[in-house]
Amino acid sequence: QVQLVESGGGLVQAGDSLRLSCAASGRTFSSYTMGWFRQAPGKEREFVAAISASTISLSYKDSVKGRFTVSRDNAKNTLFLQMNNLKPEDTAVYYCAATHLATLETTAGHFRYWGQGTQVTVSS
């Protein structure tokens, strides 16, 4: 089992950057495939990015490719999401999630463990 706590959200202007962190408890963080999802008001939770346990494989939502970078530090049990050139449509609550599945998952239902979320608001 793993517990996840996100941080780093905030209110920024369009074009600014933010770096989200997700601190994980437990000694098996390095074995999980990790993902970032987001949910805007009135919308369903959507996939943003994922990274394999080995860090070799990455996946991104098309609209964030070239702007967002997912990474992890297995020695520090931490997942990151570097977000550059933020846009108002990136406004949402961002969640990190973990799954035991070895494949690079992009479906929320395949992730078993979730953080509480951190709010990102981008003003125009």
Image (cartoon, rainbow, N blue to C red):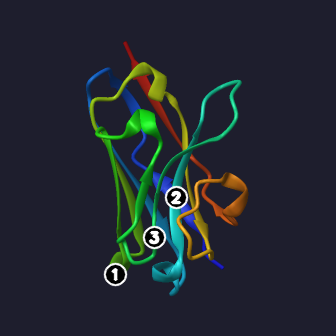
Say which element carries label 2.
strand
Seen from the viewer's position, the closer of residues 91 and 67 is: 67
Mark 1 touching mark 2, by CB under 8 A? no
Seen from the viewer's position, the closer of residues 37 and 9 is: 37
Residue 87 x, y percent position in the rendering: 38, 23
The dot on residue 35 is: 2
Judged by depth in the image, the label closer to the viewer, 1 or 3, is: 3
Judged by depth in the image, the label closer to the viewer, 1 or 2, is: 2
Say which element carries label 3.
loop
Please tell me how crowded label 1 is: few (under 14), some (14-19), or many (20+) other residues with Cα within 10 Å. Answer: few
Residue at 41% x, 23% y is 122
Image side of residue 77 versus residue 114, left or right: left
Please tell me how crowded label 3 is: few (under 14), some (14-19), or many (20+) other residues with Cα within 10 Å. Answer: many
Among the two numbered marks 1 and 3 on one chain, the one whose residue lies closer to the N terminus = 3
Among the two numbered marks 3 and 2 on one chain, the one whose residue lies closer to the N terminus = 2
Residue marked by disc 1: 75
What residue type is disc 1 on? Ala
Residue marked by disc 3: 52
The dot on residue 5 is: none
- Distance from the alpha carbon under mark 3 to that under mark 2: 9 Å
Mark 1 touching mark 3, by CB under 8 A? no
Please tell me how crowded label 2 is: few (under 14), some (14-19), or many (20+) other residues with Cα within 10 Å. Answer: many
* On-image quarter of the C terminus: top left
* On-image quarter of the N terminus: bottom right
Image side of residue 101 versus residue 89, left or right: right
Residue at 35% x, 76% y is 76
Residue at 39% x, 46% y is 8
- Distance from the alpha carbon under mark 1 to that under mark 2: 18 Å
What residue type is disc 2 on? Gly
Above-or-below relation of 35 to 45: below
